[in-house]
Amino acid sequence: MEHILAWLGVFLFLGIVVSSVQTALVIINRESCGDLSPLPFMALYINSSIGTVYATMVKDHLLLIANSFGVVFGTFCVMAYHKYSDPPIDSIKFYTIPTLFTSSAFCIAVFSNWDNKEDIVGWMMVLCALILCGAPLSTLRIVFRDKSTITMPFSTSLLTFLNAICWTSYGIIDAKNVMITLANLVGSVLGALQMILFINFGVAPGTWNWNFNTLTDMNNISSIFKKLRGGFNVNSNGHSNSALSLSSSSPSLSGMGLAGTQSQGSGSIALVMPLSDNRGDYGAVQTEQ
């Protein structure tokens, strides 16, 4: 029973990763991040990296498997955001925070002689889990203002909630690990808050379904690798030369709480607005050849 819960948690976490990858693929197809915030991508990468270090320290193979996938695909999402950010983000500034977090956890695990080093890395994991699981709630003000959950991705919120419950149960029943339990208990509470919002305001159209064609279309995948390898042309207005077409079947760009607005002149990001029109999400974005 214990291992069933853990493996179920692994697959649910992979669902969260897939949701992030879909958003990254849309960014690559659009060749622009628009007003999306890098915070959820960063949170996924940092949380998974520290989780990998912690899993290695406590020799938890199932936790290691789940977080290893998060590291690989979280890196992909972060790099995609950095490549297509507009205006361009300085590489040193962009990668400083994730590098500091992950290198700190690694150095504590490998080089320190502290008796409580597992607890320190564990608390770092709890903090990152708080940011990762709470990302969809970053649009909370808009949800209450518009009485709509259009800015919240239902599939991601549901997977986050179920994933946290599974890993909390695993931490209590099988691993008997306080940090695993606490990190995911935080996620369970935040996930429950999101479910309450969906019960109260309903599930907005376009926020619950995935478009697996985005992930399995070989022509689309080939185009994505060409863009990542060779870059893209920019016209005199600073926009991509590629023509964009929108469909109603794709994942919402407000997935994982990525929606945001950038205040003019200040350069600050406020995670409150969806990157969508009043009717819902933009849908999949295909680049015409």
Image: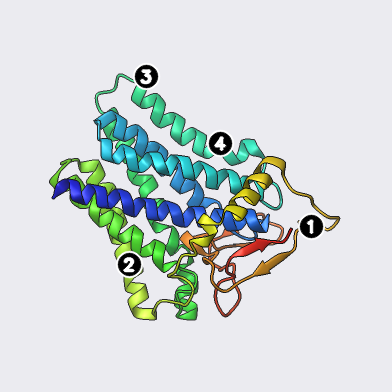
Residue placed under numbered mark 1 in the picture: 241
Spatial CA distance of label 3 from label 1 is: 49 Å
Residue placed under numbered mark 4 in the picture: 96
Q: Is residue 246 above or below residue 123?
A: below
Residue placed under numbered mark 2 in the picture: 193
Mark sitting earlier along the chain (2/4): 4
Q: Residues within 10 Å of mark 2 (few under 14, many from 20)?
A: some
Which residue lies most toward the right here? 236
Look at the image and tell me whether residue 228 can be seen. yes
Mark sitting earlier along the chain (2/1): 2
Tell me the element at label 2: helix
Mark 3 vs 1: CB contact within 8 A = no
In the rendered view, does 258 fall on the left or right side of 246? left
Residue placed under numbered mark 3 in the picture: 111
In the rendered view, does 239 fall on the left or right side of 140? right
Which residue type carries mark 2? Leu
Mark sitting earlier along the chain (3/1): 3
Q: Tell which tag, 4 or 1, sits nearer the viewer.
A: 1
Q: Quadrant of the C terminus?
A: bottom right
Mark sitting earlier along the chain (3/4): 4
Which residue type carries mark 3? Phe
Spatial CA distance of label 3 from label 2 is: 39 Å
Q: How many numbered discs sit on the rendered protein?
A: 4
Q: Name the residue rendered at 46%, 57% in the picture.
A: 19
Tell me the element at label 3: helix
Tell me the element at label 1: loop
Which colour style is shown? rainbow
Which residue type carries mark 4? Thr
Mark sitting earlier along the chain (4/1): 4
Give the x, y percent position of residue 35: 62, 60
